[in-house]
Amino acid sequence: MAQELPEFELDGLLRTGLRLESSRYDGVSGFEIYDARLGLSGKVGIVFDYALRAEYQFEADAVRLLDVRLSVPLSSEVLRLDAGLLMSGFGREAMKSKDAIPLVERSQGSLALAPGRQVGAALRGVALEQRLKYWGGLYNGEGASFGNDDRRFLFASRVEYNSVGEVEFFEDFVYELGADLTIASDSANPVLPVSRPAGDEEGSGVGIPGYTEFTGNRFVWSADAGLRYRAWSFAAEYARAEYDPQGNADKVFSDAWYAEGVYSLWGAFDLLARYDSFKPAVGLGTEPDRTQFLVFGFNVNPGFNAKFGMQYSVGIDGSLVGVSQAIDRTNTGPGLADNQFLLNLQVAF
């Protein structure tokens, strides 16, 4: 008797566009491919769900696994166990899929402070008719890599509440609240946000965000809220990370927040404005100045899994370049920059 083949579905994401930046900070101008992903997901028998996804990482010129997840229900949808390489439960925007974020890339805080994709095991579930969702997991803490050389771990958790639940209607007034917590023990892990001088000269007064290796304890928390009514929606998120280095060095901290408003016309056109702020923990050759940007966006959603978008960002108080890489080392689109224009053509299925 022939055995039935497992059910499966293909999914993918392609985002490409045009990037125009100022020459004041050696900005890039030209056509780019922001993201290229392909995935396979489905069920094995009546118990296990699985997901395998890969992305092309343009800086490394290599294909890398993005999701390797096996999931099993422990109590219907109330509690499920996930294991493998998966998105950790932390952050309102960090947990959104790339095709669902309103701009080309996530906020600075979502890139620099949220753990992102990790290898480990996690519990997740829903309650109160889909109004309450929760996550909690233990991970290697090494990002989207399969090793754990330091034999230390990271714990991440999130809880969020939606006043309506899974099904929303245009007339509904919806509010959302969320909170997150991460505790990690690191050894020479490149997760400490720093500010390096722009160009080759120290003391230039302008800092560019980056990362350096950190050994010690990391404590991160965040809170977020959202409102939606008819064509209007508003969202804000604040995150703070405290770094306690091994030895006698003092604690340092980094924080980030954003606030945005969106007006949607007929569900096909979106006008967006966002304020995005990030402060590195340490300055290397410069002060750890806060990088702040105003971002204006316009998206067209014609259907058929497609999106066309434009965005323009401007730096505040001398900010030139924002966070440009996620700490989980997954592929990242262009980071925010002063006087930057991005065109985004997206197809997701």
Image (cartoon, grey):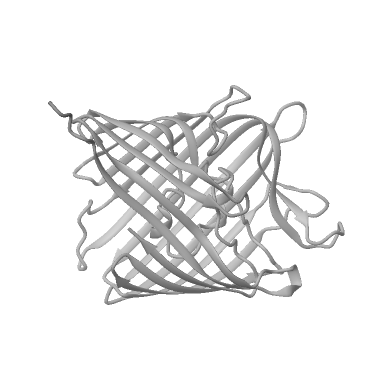
Of all residues, the one furthest to the left in this rendering is 1
337 vs 163: above or below: below
Residue at position x 41%, y 44% from top? 53
Direction from residue 220 to residue 206 in the image, left or right: right
Of all residues, the one furthest to the front in this rendering is 1
Q: Quadrant of the C terminus?
A: bottom left
Direction from residue 22 to residue 71 in the image, left or right: left
Residue at position x 29%, y 32% from top? 80
Percent position of residue 121, x then y: 41, 28
Residue at position x 53%, y 39% from top? 144
Q: Which of the 4 image quadrants contains residue 75? A: top left
Percent position of residue 48, x then y: 26, 31
Percent position of residue 209, x then y: 69, 54
Q: Which of the 4 image quadrants contains residue 18? A: bottom right
210 vs 221: above or below: below
Direction from residue 248 to residue 189 in the image, left or right: left
Total tally of numbered discs in the picture: 0
164 vs 45: above or below: below
Q: Which of the 4 image quadrants contains residue 189? A: top right
* Closer-to-camera residue (299/57): 57
Of all residues, the one furthest to the top in this rendering is 151
Q: Quadrant of the N terminus?
A: top left
Percent position of residue 176, x then y: 33, 53
